[in-house]
Amino acid sequence: MFKYNLSIICFLIIISCKENTLKIYNSTDKLLKYTGRIEQLTDSTTALIGSAASLEFNTKGDSVLLFLRSEVTPRNYVVLTINDEYQERYQIKGDTVNKITLQLPKKEFNKIGIHKATEAASGNIIIHKIEAEKLVPLNGENSVLIEFIGDSITCGALADNSDIDCNEGEYLDQHNAYLAYGPRLARTINADYMLSSVSGIGMYRNWNDENIEEPIMPQVYNNLYLNTDDSKPYKSNFKPDIVSICLGTNDMSDGDGIKERLPFDTKKYTDNYIKFVEAIFNKNPNVRIALLNSPMVSGDKNDTLVSCLKTVQNHFKDKDIVLFQFDKLFVNGCNNHPSVEDHKVLADQLTPFFKNILSKK
């Protein structure tokens, strides 16, 4: 028994000594690459705000320590990747700084990714520090940049019930933005990406609100936190080559059946959509825009939605704006949303479409 305990003590001493030799890197270190909606909070902490907002870095050594915290209690979620391979979705607690130890497979350099699995309304993931043997520069930048604007579908909401069953826990418990169609598509074509997406939101009204109590996408898009707080505008050097817009599911919704819901207004929808697209072109005149119908809308509603999108497309005769139509419903996730598996199919369908857009440079 004494020998067994001594072995454990020696092992713990070795691990402790190993950790003590690691160098501390603050979240603001220049060797760390952030993508998406983020905010530097202090000299040493940075917030991942939006869906799939990420931190990536290259590290030398056989292990790395990550120190993260959820801004909200009791929990939030990140997806961790090693050398661009999915590891798992980690639960991050909000009452403490969480230390995550990753054992690394390669002897020389390994690429680590921390990706926010949830949307802005779910609260920030706070990056405190990284402890590693040595950080080294990432290998180059992807030449293609894509922004995905949308609602809960684009957020990857209600897609992943691998940890907590549908209709259990909190709304964020089934989010997995990393495995949503946008990030999957972007990684397939080697593009950097960001998501500007909000559950329940629409172009002129929301899932259960006629834009009376809740803001719509055109009212929050330019705000960093995708809410009505315009004291923090969204400013970024991210200049996308393509902006993909998938908004209309909530505009077409019948709501909860309890709150008063007006008939769908094609004019309001198309007018708001056109103004929104005009604003995007004003900021980035050479961007290409992809309009997507909804993988959650079918039948007459889909016909109406597609007709509206064609009206928007035809308005911009001198601009590069294209339309993609999903040909069936993808509702195998929680509450009739696309599941993680559905998102893979959506991304596979979109891949040749986006490759074709890029080929016309």
Image (tube, grey):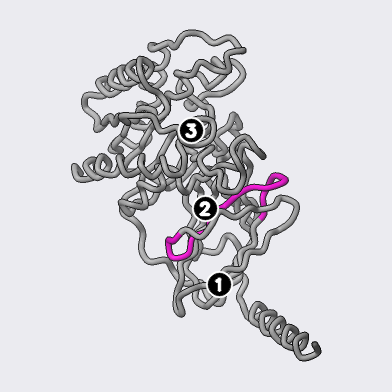
x and y percent of residue 265 in the render? 43, 10
x and y percent of residue 52 in the render? 50, 47
x and y percent of residue 122 in the render? 62, 40
User: Quadrant where the N terminus lies?
Assistant: bottom right
**Of labels 2 and 1, the one closer to you:** 1
Query: Relative to 109, is 143 on the left or the right?
Result: left
Q: Is residue 82 magenta?
A: yes
Q: Amino acid at mark 1?
A: Gln
User: Quadrant where the C terminus lies?
Assistant: top left
Which secondary structure lies at badge 2? strand
On the image, numbered disc 2 is attached to which residue?
Answer: 115
The foreground one among 126 and 347 is 347
* Mark 3 neighbour class, 10 Å CA radius: few under 14, some 14 to 19, many 20 or more: many
On the image, numbered disc 1 is attached to which residue?
Answer: 103
Question: Which is more N-terminal, label 1 or label 2?
Answer: 1
Q: Amino acid at mark 2?
A: His
Res 12 → quadrant: bottom right
**Of labels 1 and 3, the one closer to you:** 3
Question: Which is more N-terminal, label 2 or label 3?
Answer: 2
Range shown magenta: 69-85
On the image, numbered disc 3 is attached to which residue?
Answer: 337
Which secondary structure lies at badge 1? strand
Q: Main secondary structure of the magenta part?
A: strand
Tell me the residue at 55%/40% (across/down): 119
